[in-house]
Amino acid sequence: MTDKNRVWIFDTTLRDGEQSPGATMTHAEKLEIAQMLDEMGVDVIEAGFPIASEGDFAAVTEIAKRSQNSVICGLARAQLPDIDRCWEAVKHARRPRIHTFIGTSPLHRAIPNLDMDQMADRIHQTVTHARNLCDNVQWSPMDATRTEHDYLCRVVEIAIKAGATTINIPDTVGYTAPRESADLIRMLLERVPGADEIVFATHCHNDLGMATANSLAAVEAGARQIECTINGLGERAGNTALEEVVMALKVRHDIMPFDTGIDTTKIMGLSRRVAQASGFAVQPNKAIVGKNAFLHESGIHQDGVLKNVETFEIMRPADIGLNEANIAMGKHSGRAALRSKLRDLGYEVGDNQLKDIFVRFKALADRKKEIYDDDLVALMQDSAANTEADYLQVKHLRVVCGSDGQSADLTMIVGGEEKTVHAEGDGPVDACFNAVKAIWPHQAVLQLYQVHAVTEGTDAQATVSVRMEEDGRIATGQAADTDTILASVRAYVGALNRLKVRREMVGENADAKQVSMYSH
Ligand code: KIV
Ligand code: ZN
């Protein structure tokens, strides 16, 4: 890194983000998201935790092989086999990086039962080993913000001497506050010999809602890499949101004169793709990428924005790739118009995919007079989540509801075979889910069932998200339809398809959560 005001963006959506219970993404989704991150100008992509599973190893390897500009990084615990496995995966990248870590706070030191000296030796040994394999090594003292300052300085110095080129300072449990975050980086820069020769990174979790503020404070104090995820995805309250730090640095360049290499017009496309692949919908009032982030509902605001956009807008929707003209499309819109609209929304579709999407678009246009951008996004998300290759598919549904009772007649395709049942329940959704259960018996427990209207009006599409749990594995399903009950059943079946895939992968040790982050 040459320019002293250049801040590197390290995206960990595919590693820390995917660690959110239920956010597991498929191999194909990970490859697609990595490519989008690379095209967006992300400096480092943390592609996974290669020792965690065969699935993670395969994804990191393939992402490394396909990478163009971004550094491709893999995570490894402070163990030699972890580091070797990580190197095996990332070595295919044009620019590989090994990221190794160990918990250094008193609470974390107690887990592997290492005293301060033993841990220091382990850090020296593992960072040296990583550096012998790769000339780009990142080291993290997990729970750094709750580690004694003297000990933190000591281990950071050891890691630098052993060859670490980036030192990441994680606020693992989202405990720190902005002033503290800055003071910590400043203290390390002042006290640790060799600190001026490496890059300090900041890695914040959002448990107290301060991840963005803490990351920016660390940068002002001298950190030059921000670790973050798209939509702030991540365990518990999530990680620092990429879109927030990048746009904060862009919009408030006057007081934070730091540059990133991010093409911000790609933010919205990535946000939608990650929401769809992870099954974690973006809250409507989420900064930058929430559905309401650029909506002006009140008369005073609308009036002001019409007269001069700067009265109530500090950035333009186009800056993040949001198409301002939410122009309605309808049943007379052709294939070329659809393709161009999808492109505006950040979706590049091939001819075959366009053919399928067009059929679904026409079907929707028959039921709904005007198709808005959000309808198309919902349609694209539904098509990505539910495909004709799925083992379980909903073929036909007829529901009876009202004051005399509720029942469902459901026909599904199960591995190519058609099955029909009749079921009853407490309400139409319950009757439908009982019908699915009769066709495909399972032990999975419904953890979340959410319905959102995509647009306004009684003919609006509903997007339904479902989260299910089975034997500690969590999977989500999503679907959109103008018929809320049909969308509910398709989302439910989508989650069951994902659980089935994950169950089959367990035999190959493909469940990323099988390896404990703490067993050092
Ligand atoms: O939050 C954390 O401490 C981490 C480390 C593995 C870097 O994600
Ligand atoms: Zn983390």
Image (cartoon, grey):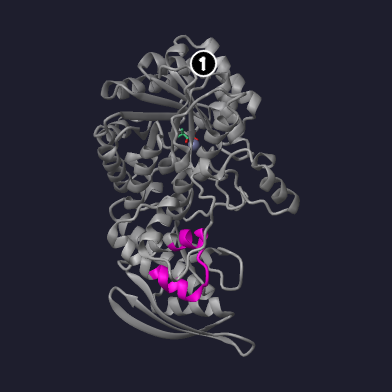
Disc 1 marks a residue whose amino acid type is Cys
For the view shown, which residue lies furthest in the front direction? 307
Is 511 in front, or is 303? 303
Q: Quick check: 258 above or below 429?
A: above
Does the beta carbon at disc 1 come under 8 Å from ligand 1? no
Q: Secondary structure at mark 1?
A: helix
| Residue 42 locus on image (x, y percent) | 41, 34
Residue, disc 1: 153
Asked if one can make out residue 233 in the rendered structure from this viewpoint, the answer is no
Q: Residue at x 59, y 79 (%)?
A: 427
Q: Residue at x 48, y 45 (%)?
A: 321
Asked if one can make out residue 30 in the rendered structure from this viewpoint, the answer is yes
| Residue 326 locus on image (x, y percent) | 54, 56
| Residue 95 locus on image (x, y percent) | 30, 29
Q: Quick check: 480 above or below 422?
A: above
Magenta segment, principal secondary structure?
Answer: helix
Quadrant of the snapshot with the C terminus: top left
Left or right: 156 as drawn, with respect to 32: right
Q: Residue at x 48, y 64 (%)?
A: 329
Q: Which residues are magenta?
A: 360-379
| Residue 159 locus on image (x, y percent) | 41, 18
Is 372 in front, or is 76? 372
Q: Residue at x 46, y 80 (%)?
A: 435
For the view shown, which residue lies furthest in the bottom direction? 404
Is 37 in front, or is 351? 351
Q: Quick check: 106 above or below 446?
A: above
Quadrant of the snapshot with the N terminus: top left
